[in-house]
Image (cartoon, grey):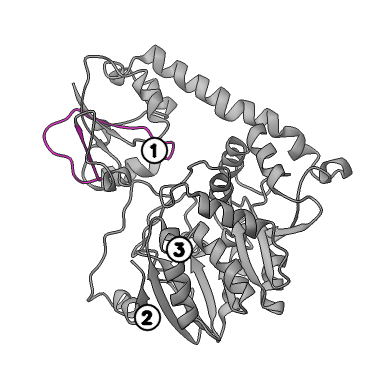
Amino acid sequence: MKVYIFGLGERKKYLDRCLRKAVTVSGYIDNYKANNMSSLAGKPVMKQGGLCGSYDYIIITLLDYESVKDSLVQEGIPSEKIISFFDFADASNEKYWNVINPYKWRTELIWKHYTEITIPTIDNLNYELYANSTDMKKICPEIVDAQSTVRILAHERKCLARFGDNEFELMLGRLRTDYQDVDFRLAGRLREVLASDEDNLLVAIADNYGSLEKYTDRAARDIRMYMTKEVRESHMRLLDLNRTYYDAYLSRPYMIYRDKTSSKEKFDQVKALWKDEEVLIVEGEYTRFGVGNDLLDNARRVERIIAPAKNAFDQYQKIKDKVCMHGKNKLILAILGPTATVLSYDLAREGYWILDIGQIDIEYGWFLLGVKERCALKYKRVSEIVSYEMAETDREDENIKTYMSQVMDYVL
């Protein structure tokens, strides 16, 4: 019995404990890890589409197994040859029991559900139920809602620096993302930004600390899984409960919310920020902010600086110098993960108008498609879809032509 394993992340360990000894692993598929490693334990590590030789099954070890399976089926791989390890239906399917030990498999899933979903839900319950109580406000940060945050940015032309899970984890010296390694210089700069009190800079954090009722079940579950007691305590050591923060989820107006009826209004409000403005975008390679949709159509002019897609902070001074060179009297939109957070702070202090705008373009693409689950988007790399890597570089495509004409400089 020969199998390929899709995904080399933390949760592969669950499969490792259940795979039958008679099964031979022919190789591994991981679109990100394949950029830095060619083999593991003597077996090839490849990107999706690189399968070679015969095999019986592909086993997906990612929680987002549905989108991965869909992309494999679109490649022509029969669905019956795909096993989703974290799908309870597959764990109950007898035809897969000669590949994965059914007793160990179902035990692992039950234990994972208990430790990663049940316990976090119980631990977070008090914060959700009593979010608006006086006592709870003493131990949770005050966060101005997303729409009010956007209004302040527009009316007062404030700058924006956002902190999400990745920024907090980097400050704590922990790796959470594939596009930025742990860097203690970056961690120190992020701490400096979080503690800053510049008049023209809004410091935004994700609204994860109190009630989660406005979020979808999946979004609330993911927040609870991350916001453990230990993580919450570490965040509170970094935050100042005597100050006001702003909502970093202004860059996430669609997918995570249960009620999506106001999504268009939220996007229109953000789009108004650059109406009739000259815009300079600094972004990672293949981010392609606004390409293939009308997100930037109301801007007077759009220019771009292309920076590294991974570990952009390694080139921080060069990126900053290029943005300063091209960004005078323009609205600067930064889409560079935690590097954008630091850049917004530094340039705000130097009198530039800069917004660490995050992945609102990806959200807008999903909104236009009307999808309820994250999916790949044409023209751009979507970091949250680990099964998909953008590969469209056709220079004859009209959208690519427009994009290339906007690029003013590179830091690669």
Q: Earlier in the sequence, mark 3 or mark 1?
A: 1
Q: Residues within 10 Å of mark 3 (few under 14, many from 20)?
A: many
Farthest-out residue, top: 103
* Residue drawn at the location 31% of the way across and 43% of the way down: 33
Look at the image and tell me whether residue 381 can be seen: yes
Residue 318 drawn at (x, y percent): 42, 70
**Magenta-drawn segment:** 43-64
Secondary structure under the numbered disc 3 in the rendered image: helix
Rendering quarter of residue 194: bottom right
Q: Is residue 28 left or right of residue 380?
A: left
Q: In the rendered image of this protein, does residue 113 appear above or below residue 375?
A: above
Q: Amino acid at mark 2?
A: Met
Out of 205 and 77, give the one closest to the viewer: 205
Secondary structure under the numbered disc 1 in the rendered image: helix
Residue 364 drawn at (x, y percent): 50, 64
Q: Earlier in the sequence, mark 2 or mark 3?
A: 3
Q: Earlier in the sequence, mark 1 or mark 2?
A: 1
Residue 65 is marked as 1
Farthest-out residue, right: 134
* Residue drawn at the location 57% of the way across and 47% of the way down: 171
Residue 365 is marked as 3
Residue 408 is marked as 2
Q: Amino acid at mark 3?
A: Gly
Out of 4 and 366, give the one closest to the viewer: 4
Residue 130 drawn at (x, y percent): 81, 39
Q: Amino acid at mark 1?
A: Tyr
